[in-house]
Amino acid sequence: MADQPKPLMPHATATWLVDNTGLAFEQIAQFCGLHILEVQAMADDLASSKYTGRDPVHAGELTQAEIERGQQDAGYELKMQRAPVEVTRTKGPRYTPVSKRQDKPDGIAWILRNHSEISDAQIGKLIGTTRNTIGAIRERSHWNIQNIQPKDPVTLGLCSQRELDAVVAKAAKSIVTDEDAAEPEIVVPGTSDREKLIEELRAERDSNQKAAAEAVQEAEAAAWLENKRAEEAGGEGQS
């Protein structure tokens, strides 16, 4: 049953099961997707974090009959009654756990340094921050700017690699669209490099043709003059 879905709040659910049932630690660990030592620490009140118990029966994830069956057989694996519905946010800034909030400035600084094409609005949605904070980090007026070190937000756990890649791709596509929509440059005829080269080649061709025509004319004139001289020399010889 490794592919069975886990409770929406596994630690809180395990705490409730430890406090309110006679299930074996192994059964609770297996159902909640936790290590048995975590469940043992909860039972011994040695866990580093304290959780408020969450009733899986009330949540519809487990039935009382299933719990009783598990209490009668320590080797029985609990079956989930109904998979939890994941709660997703569709509006507003991304929620970031308290333990990760201190890392936000580092993640923002990394994006500003490595992906300047991403807009402030996109950064705010991706990281879960405000435009004022982004602007302060960009302008280096943030109150803690001396301690901010650019770090990959994926490594910091502020977003997933897929989410970051999607934002980068969207920002890049937006830039290309803006460039395509920009007003085309007006080129005055005869001023572009290509047209200048064509004009130069035409001028050179015309010059060559003119020189060739002049050479032919000079050759024809020289030949006529030579014939004329030959005729005159022949006439003098006969006389």
Image (tube, helix red, strand yellow):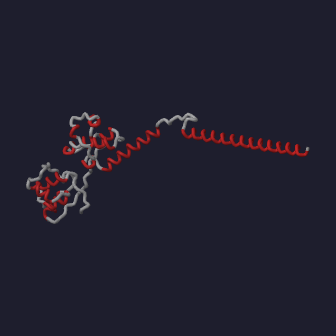
- Quadrant containing the N terminus is bottom left
Query: 8 left or right of 40?
Result: right
Percent across and percent down for residue 130 are 27, 37
Question: Residue at coordinates 63% horizontally, 39% vertically from top-left?
Answer: 203
Query: 169 left or right of 60?
Result: right
Query: 13 left or right of 213?
Result: left
> 229 or 216: which is nearer to us?
229
> 196 or 22: which is nearer to us?
196
Percent across and percent down for residue 36 are 15, 60
The answer to which quarter of the image holds residue 28 is bottom left
> 52 or 236: which is nearer to us?
236
Question: Residue at coordinates 27% horizontally, 48% vertically from top-left?
Answer: 154
Question: Residue at coordinates 54% horizontally, 37% vertically from top-left?
Answer: 192
- Quadrant containing the C terminus is top right
- Please count the marks in the image: 0
Question: Residue at coordinates 34% horizontally, 41% vertically from top-left?
Answer: 116
The residue positioned farthest toward the left in the image shown: 44
The answer to which quarter of the image holds residue 106 is top left
Percent across and percent down for residue 29 are 17, 59
Percent across and percent down for residue 164 are 32, 47
